[in-house]
Image: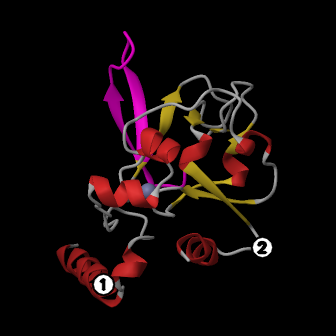
Amino acid sequence: MQRRYFLYASAGLIAALLLSPKDMVFADHGEIEKMTLSKDEWEKRLTPEQFRVLRKEGTEPSGTSPLNNEKRKGTYVCAGCGFELFSSDMKYDSGTGWPSFFDTIEGHVETSTDFKLLYPRTEYHCARCGGHQGHVFKDGPKPTGLRYCNNGVALKFVPAEKKTGEEIKEKTE
Ligand SMILES: [Zn+2]
């Protein structure tokens, strides 16, 4: 048994060494390369409303996001850094006026507890840049029973026919 464990451990180490830092971002288990920018850099990169939501944990007014009506196949990426957070298969109409999802791309979203209202809420954010996305509640549909209530301004939708990389490139040009 010990020998087998050693072999698995070695294989894992070799696989880790073969991956470039870029590939590591999309590894499923930890090892997400964090993106850290200064306040000034974020302000340059984001619109004022994106900055308020992503970096200051603000909330956009209900019913204001065009993504509420987005029904195409594709991927929802963090508006701050382009990291893939949700697929269109995870989206549903919660009737709240915020884009809602019942699941996230595994490992790409992290949670913390906040007390901005009188009761504790579970805040969640992009695992790469830490940008605030929304709050998660336990009144979602099956199979998870979760409702990820997202600020549309904190997301960008990438239609399935377009690759994430191209979208990000366009944004920064
Ligand atoms: Zn991000």
- Ligand 1 falls in quadrant: bottom left
The residue located at (62%, 42%) in the rendering is 152
Categorize mark 1 by other alpha carbons within 10 Å: few (<14), some (14-19), many (20+). few
Q: Is residue 80 above or below residue 147?
A: below
**Relative to residue 110, is residue 100 depicted above or below?**
above
Residue at 28 percent of width and 87 percent of height: 17
Q: Which residues are magenta?
A: 104-125
Quickly name the residue at label 1.
Answer: 11
Instruction: Evaluate whether residue 103 shows in this view.
Output: no
Which element carries disc 1, helix, strand or loop? Answer: helix
Q: Which mark is residue 72?
A: none
Q: Earlier in the sequence, mark 2 or mark 1?
A: 1
> 107 left or right of 65?
left
What secondary structure is marked by label 2?
loop
Query: In this rendering, would 31 be left or right of 69?
Result: left
| Viewer-closest of 13 and 109 | 109
In the rendering, at what x and y percent does residue 96 appear? 69, 24
Q: Quadrant of residue 16?
A: bottom left
For the residue marked with disc 2, what is the amino acid?
A: Glu
Q: Residue at x 29, y 52 (%)?
A: 39
User: Residue 63 location in percent, x, y?
Assistant: 71, 29
Judge whether residue 48 is colored magenta.
no
Residue occupied by mark 2: 161
Please tell me whether mark 2 or mark 1 is closer to you in this view: 2
